[in-house]
Image: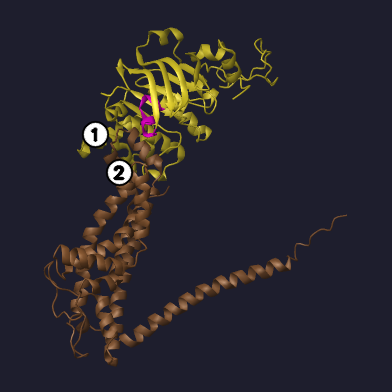
Amino acid sequence: MSTKLDIYTAKRRGRITNLLFTSVCFLATVTCVIVLFILIWNIILQGKSWLSWDFVDSFPSRFPHKAGIKSALYGSIWLIGLTALFSVPLGVGAAVYLEEYAPKSRWRKLIQLNISNLAGVPSIVYGILGLALFVRALALERSVLSGALTLTLVVLPIIILASQEALRSVPDSIRRSAYALGATRWQTVWYQVLPASLPGIMTGVILALSRALGEAAPLIVVGAMAYVPFVPERLSDEFTSLPIQIFNWTSRPQEDFHHLAAAGILVLLIVLVSMNAIAIFVRHKYGKKIRW
Amino acid sequence: MASTPLVKKMIQPSDKATSGFSKAPIVRPSIPSGKRMRTADELAQATEKISVRDMSFYYSENRALTDISLSIPECCVTAFIGPSGCGKSTFLRCFNRMNDMIEGTRVEGEILLEGQEIYSSRTDIVTLRKRIGMVFQKSTPFPKSIFDNVSFGPKIAGIRKKKDLYEIVERSLQRSALWDEVKDRLNESALNLSGGQQQRLCIARALANDPDILLMDEPASALDPASTARIEDLIFELKEQYTIVIVTHNMQQAARVSDQAAFFYQGVLVESGATEALFTNPQKQQTEDYITGRFG
């Protein structure tokens, strides 16, 4: 006679393992959240009394109470704007070529492998390349243009990979249907495939630009200045950026500058969060219409 | 006889059952009596729309179709039947050169569209595909509005005026019997439509190009019986204006909608002819075995 299992008593070992695994995962999540929370809280405590309109609208100064972040904020906006202008058409174009046009050959595989690797190269390496290529060889000097071109190098592989992923998620049936209706390859890509992959591409682009916004190392190499008492007005103007200004303030001995740095970080975070909010909004707005 | 079911089950001893297949009762798809099907004489008199002569098709080194010769008459429904992998869909895709997208494919022999060679180097594939529309097995609406779906073909053909596009959209949707269901929500996403409606939308999308031929690759295989019936009714109406070629797994469907049928087996066209003749009195043993459901 076989023993019947009592449904009220689960196997004890299984229950303990389950509980253990759940708690480990929960703890991991909580740790991350707590660390992030402490960081942000600390910065808010340090910086909030220094964060004011005057702070945003003043140039840096030797005197902490007069110092502001205007030139760094404008520099960052210039950099991000230019970087977007260069990297989006290049990155999306390259992704479209690789996904939709390039024949499946060994060359394509090699290029693909290289792009994946480039996405993992430390940004300072791009800084050195930017210094040699843009600042020296092309004689663009330590300009906002040199900085933006260098940042373009940093984010280009990320944009290409994200766009490729987005293009790949468009089912082949869409392409086949368009071809069957007499569309050329260009019409198929432009009217069907690109619009369908737009939310994915936009998210990738904005995340890549968020990364560019936070980069300091490559800009220091191409010669971003720590003290810039003016706003860039031309491509050839010298510049600074938010992370560089923050870095500069934290490295000073006076306590007041550390508070300034915290306020600067808050500004940087606000810009970052708004960019990510745009990404989420775009995804939501266009993503709703597209279901496979 | 008004209540005669479309599918009659006839159990009869087969005088041809000599091949040692199963002794299962034979189910022969019956020809519906209600709808008017073109007779063999009418088929013979119809203008030849597409003519296939000694055509073979290769995927790299594998020959998928062997020496096929077939005439497709104008304004008739031609059904390709046969077991999975017999090459019928491959054959269908030869007509609008969709196989060109697959690397390493090759065609030998001739396929003529009104006397012009489809596989000529002078053929413009874009124009060819505008004349020969296609509907796929799985409905594949673009993730856009109903209007944008139907107007895509005319739009890329260069028609820009909203008014002209609207007329084409309305006419195409009416022809595909979808207009009344969607006329108030042309700007809604096509993905909100039901499966059957999506398939009729894909038919409308193909019709918007004003083709003369419509290829359908198992257009109803993913649909419920009611939607299938609507598609079949639609095919019956459309054949007055369009030459239709349909691939189907469903014997009953082939019997219901087609005027001419062609049976494929392992890349070979075994037998073709007027549907009525092919289903009631096939000339080849393989055809008999397949349509009575003893293999495939």
Going by the numbered disc 1, the residue's amino acid type is: Ala
Q: Residue at x 79, y 60 (%)?
A: A5
Where is residue B274 drawn, in percent x and y?
A: 47, 12
Q: In the image, B167: left or right of B29? A: left
Chain A: drawing colour: brown
Helix, strand or loop under label 2: helix
Q: Nearer the viewer, residue A87 or B30?
A: A87
Pair 2/1: label in front: 2
Residue B133, quarter of the rendered image:
top left
Badge 2 is on which residue?
Answer: A189
Going by the numbered disc 2, the residue's amino acid type is: Val
Q: Nearer the viewer, residue A234 or A98?
A: A98
Q: Is residue A94 magenta?
A: no
Residue situated furthest right in the rendering: A1
Q: CA distance from mark 2 to mark 1?
A: 16 Å
Helix, strand or loop under label 1: loop
